[in-house]
Amino acid sequence: QVQLVESGGGLVQPGGSLRLSCAASRSIFSIFVIGWYRQAPGKQRELVATLTSGSNTNYADSVKGRFTISRDGAKNTVSLQMNSLKPEDTAVYSCYAQPSLSSPRLYWGQGTQVTVSS
């Protein structure tokens, strides 16, 4: 089991940057997979980025080269650095975790709004 609390959303102009953080209630290194989904109004939920306990990362094609997922073991947080933001990045971003390889159960944060607009 794990609790997740997100922070860092907001309004930013196109081309700008934002950093989202997700604080976990247990050691970030003990979580099998942790990452971010996003969902824009009227669109399907999209997997944005993932980070495994083995330090493997994966990104949606739409964010490759612009977004970076990382973790801080001292703070038990995972962050999503978002650069060169576009209006189409506007969505609710949610942190999720699959703590164990042996269980498909996912845990979710509350979500944070990211709006890219001039």
Image (spheres, rainbow, N blue to C red):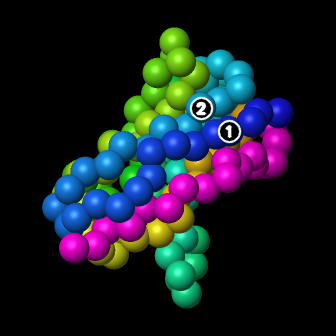
C-alpha gap between disc 1 and disc 2: 6 Å
Q: In this view, does 88 lie to the left or right of 71?
A: left
Q: Which residue is drawn at 53% across and 82% down?
A: 41
In this rendering, the answer to whether 73 lies above or below 22 is above
Dot 2 lies on which element?
A: strand
Residue corresponding to mark 2:
23
Q: Residue 46, relative to residue 97: is it above or below?
A: below
Residue 1's x, y, as percent? 82, 33
| Three-letter amino acid code of the residue under disc 1 | Leu
| Image quadrant in which the C terminus is located | bottom left
Kindly indicate whether the residue at mark 2 contacts the one at mark 1 (C-beta within 8 angstroms): yes
Whether residue 47 is visible: no
* Disc 1 target residue: 4
Front position in the image: 38 or 61: 38
Residue span colored magenta: 100-118
Q: Position of residue 28 (x, y in %)?
A: 60, 24
Question: Looking at the image, can residue 78 be seen?
Answer: yes
Q: What element carries label 1?
A: strand
User: Going by the image, does 42 lie left or right of 2?
Assistant: left
